Image: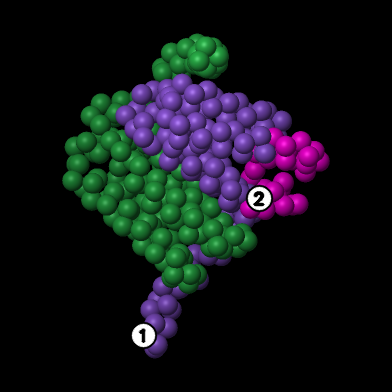
Chain colours: A purple, B green
Amino acid sequence: MRKTIFSLSIAVIPFLLVAPVLADEGNPAIIHRQGIYSAVGGHMKAIKSILLLEFDAAKDVTFHAQGIVDAFTHMGNSFPPGSDKGETKAKPEIWTDKDKFAQLGKNAFGAANDLLKAAQGGDKQITLAAFKKLGESCKSCHDDFKSK
Amino acid sequence: MRKTIFSLSIAVIPFLLVAPVLADEGNPAIIHRQGIYSAVGGHMKAIKSILLLEFDAAKDVTFHAQGIVDAFTHMGNSFPPGSDKGETKAKPEIWTDKDKFAQLGKNAFGAANDLLKAAQGGDKQITLAAFKKLGESCKSCHDDFKSK
């Protein structure tokens, strides 16, 4: 027991030192949603490399599509009131036109699920079409709700 | 059957039009590895928001740690010869000092698995320590093998 407490203390020390600095880096909701969207964007980019640029990993499209669906599923409460302040490209319309923002979010989530189903089906052209639809769905939301 | 073929043709047309343009955008291996690293970075950022900035999603740390491990697992042949050319921050040392690069990659993968185990264990301080170790592991590789 004593050993456990000692090990824990050693492990905690660096964070006691660095946490206050890191904690100033931003609004937690902003950092969280940027992380989620980066994960989504990363999987999108990987799928693009496979479907459009012929990177040799055809069997991984399902993994990446699942990664997008799962990331969206873990969005949580990422746009709470007040998280329009700070280093963010989120436009004020997210909070003033909530219904439209929610609808476009649902559309993107639906398109991500369609991509997953298409990838699982294994037909490249159908998967490409679903990938393109998801890309358009992302863009339609960015056009209205994300600053350049 | 005729209807299926017709639908497929409609779906394929946009890609026949846009694929050649998109294909000029980069080396497929570069785009693929950037996608993988963006997914990893996104999950790292989400974990940071939870562990260091108190974003209210403590139960999601395991998901994000798993996302990092899974993304690394799907790296594939992401640094083939010739993929030092193009829009990339990959330094030439990746190909001239392969053994060191491979070792640092293994270290990062090990640190990601350690983070996953820690997150599954549920102790926040142990998870924080493992998260910091993974961050250091990423940095030690970037220092030698990634341009600023």
Quote the CA–CA distance across marks 2 and 1. Answer: 39 Å
The image shows residue A75 at horizontal and vertical percentages of 61, 49
**Image height of A137 relative to B51, above or below:** above
Depth check: give the residue in front, B107 or B73.
B73
Q: Classify 10 Å Cα crowding around label 1: few (below 14), some (14-19), many (20 and above).
A: few
The image shows residue B124 at horizontal and vertical percentages of 50, 70
**In the image, farthest residue toward the bottom:** A2
Q: Which mark is on residue A78? A: 2
Among the 4 quarters of the image, the one containing residue B119: bottom left
Determine whether, in the image, residue A134 is placed left or right of residue B80: right
Check disc 2 and give the amino acid type. Ser
**In the image, farthest residue toward the front:** B1
Depth check: give the residue in front, B44 or A27.
B44
Residue at disc 2, secondary structure: loop
Label 1, on which residue?
A3
Depth check: give the residue in front, A5 or A108.
A108
Check disc 1 and give the amino acid type. Lys
The image shows residue B62 at horizontal and vertical percentages of 48, 59
Residue B139 seen in the figure: no
Residue at horizontal 49 percent and vertical 64 percent from the top: A18
Residue at horizontal 43 percent and vertical 54 percent from the top: B66
Count of numbered badges drawn on the protein: 2
